[in-house]
Amino acid sequence: MTLVDSISACFSKYITFSGRAQRSEFWWFMLFLTVGQIISGAADAVMFGDNIVVLGGVEISYNTGYFGNIFALATFLPTWAAQVRRLHDTGRSGWWLLFALVPLIGVIVLLIWMIRKGNEGTNKYGPDPLV
């Protein structure tokens, strides 16, 4: 699956939490999201500049993040759905995403599960997406 195919698949399954997502579909979409956030963050910095707040004598610089927030809002549901479908490919329920709430350990375990190869053949979440 290519980058364009992955983006198309994830947006066409905008809120589809059933089925399975192969590794390439998931990771190409994650790359798209990362690049999109970088570009929207750069656009925010160029358009709106940085704001400076002084807290306890320390200057903290931040930008407003309008474009970044719009991008994140537009991609929230497809990202969530792709994560659930990726967990389904490994034979796990989408509820395992809540494991990310466990500090540090949860994110590491989920990352390992997302990286690993999915179950071969049909599992309880559907047919193998590679077939």
Image: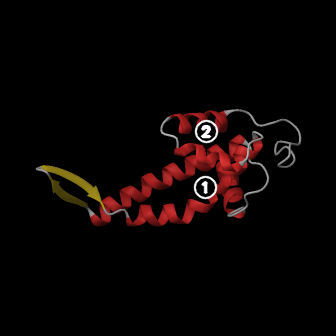
Q: 111 or 71, which is in the foreground?
A: 111
Kindly indicate whether the residue at mark 1 contacts the one at mark 2 (C-beta within 8 angstroms): no
Q: Which element carries disc 2, helix, strand or loop? A: helix
Q: Position of residue 22 (x, y in %)?
A: 74, 43
Q: Position of residue 57 (x, y in %)?
A: 10, 50
The first of marks 2 and 1 along the sequence is 1
Q: Residue at x 69, y 47 (%)?
A: 25
Amino acid type, residue under disc 2 in the picture: Leu
Amino acid type, residue under disc 1 in the picture: Thr
Q: Which mark is residue 79?
A: 1
Q: Which mark is residue 32?
A: none
Q: Residue at x 13, y 51 (%)?
A: 56
Q: Residues within 10 Å of mark 2 (few under 14, many from 20)?
A: some
Residue 70 visible to the viewer: yes
The quadrant the C terminus occupies is top right
Q: Position of residue 46 (x, y in %)?
A: 31, 61
Left or right, 110 with reference to 23: left
Q: Tell me: residue 48, above or below residue 97.
A: below
Q: Which mark is residue 110?
A: 2
Q: Tell me: residue 85, above or below residue 109.
A: below
Left or right, 82 with reference to 76: right
